[in-house]
């Protein structure tokens, strides 16, 4: 691998919390009388909380919400989501992911997280990776969501690395776009790999070891 550092998206790459996001957004949408299904939910991947809510509100037919009401709704969703996340444990971290991370680290490669989620520290703690990464850039230190490259550029900055020396690992097309916009190559997993939009399109997480 020519890169000296790897920046990982969290959800859908290191672990999977999609089902909890979906259930929490669905509960809020139902309360507001808004139709919401898994197809709409897929549009929310890699998108900030408020931007996600704006997508959900495209189908809202009630009285327009004030900014304060929107914030209250997203906070309600996050409270539901965090309650569900309490069920997560180190068992939610696959052996493949942990073994691959350990091998990359043994090769002297710096490892970081680049996630839009403000819940990143909580999730990392739940799955036993609280102090594992060399740097964490997340929704708590950025102002722009993917496909803006801010979250990855901050991760590179925290690592003390030039962006061109960093590889981003993502499962969402918006994340791949963000990596390219930041001057980084990208390894695609999941849906992003299926659309062949990465520099490298991986079948499985451990394929990182072959780059």
Image (spheres, grey):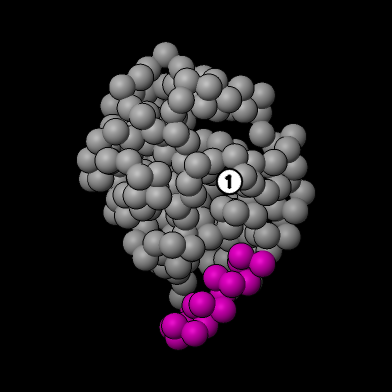
The percent coordinates of residue 147 (x first, y second) are 31, 50
Q: Is residue 163 magenta?
A: no
The residue lying at 45 percent from left, 67 percent from top is 50
Q: Residue at x 58, y 46 (%)?
A: 18
Give coordinates of residue 191: x percent, y percent: 43, 33
Residue 71: within the magenta?
A: yes
Q: How packed is label 1: few (under 14 Cα within 10 Å), some, or many (20 or more)?
A: some
Disc 1, SS: helix
Q: Quadrant of residue 182?
A: top left
Q: Residue furthest top?
A: 210
Specify whether residue 6 is in view: yes
Residue 81 is left or right of residue 140, and the answer is: right
Q: What is the magenta range?
A: 62-79
Is residue 115 visible to us here? Answer: no
> Chief secondary structure of the magenta span?
helix
The residue depicted at 53 percent of the width and 67 percent of the height is 34
Q: How many marks?
A: 1
From the top left corner, tell me how far across and down residue 157 is, in percent.
34, 49
Q: Quadrant of the N terminus?
A: top left
Q: Front-most of 49 and 137?
A: 137
Name the side, left or right, on which 149 lies relative to 47: left
Q: Quadrant of residue 201?
A: top left
Q: Which residue is mark 1?
A: 18
Residue drawn at x 68%, y 64% as measured from the top left: 80
Front residue of 187/134: it is 134
Query: Percent position (x, y) of residue 3?
Result: 33, 27
Is 1 rendered above or below residue 77? above
Q: Quadrant of the C terminus?
A: top left
Q: Is residue 102 left or right of residue 67?
A: right
């Amino acid at each position: 691998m020519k890169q000296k550092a790897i920046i990982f998206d969290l959800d859908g790459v290191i672990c999977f919390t999609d089902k909890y996001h979906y259930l929490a957004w669905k509960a809020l949408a139902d309360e507001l009388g808004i139709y919401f299904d898994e197809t709409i939910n897929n549009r929310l991947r890699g998108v900030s909380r408020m931007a996600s809510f704006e997508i959900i509100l495209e189908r809202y037919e009630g009285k327009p919400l004030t900014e304060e009401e929107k914030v209250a709704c997203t906070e309600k969703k996050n409270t539901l989501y965090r309650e569900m996340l309490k069920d997560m444990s180190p068992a939610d971290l696959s052996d493949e992911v942990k073994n691959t991370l350990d091998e990359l680290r043994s090769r002297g490669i710096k490892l970081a997280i680049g996630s839009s989620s403000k819940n990143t520290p909580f999730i990392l703690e739940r799955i036993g990776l609280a102090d594992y990464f060399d740097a964490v850039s997340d929704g708590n230190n950025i102002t722009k969501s993917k496909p803006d490259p801010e979250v990855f550029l901050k991760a590179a900055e925290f690592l003390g690395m030039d962006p061109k020396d960093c590889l981003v690992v993502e499962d969402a097309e918006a994340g791949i776009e963000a990596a390219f916009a930041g001057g980084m190559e990208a390894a695609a997993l999941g849906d992003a790999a299926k659309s062949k939009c990465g520099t490298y399109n991986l079948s499985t997480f451990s394929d990182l070891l072959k780059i």
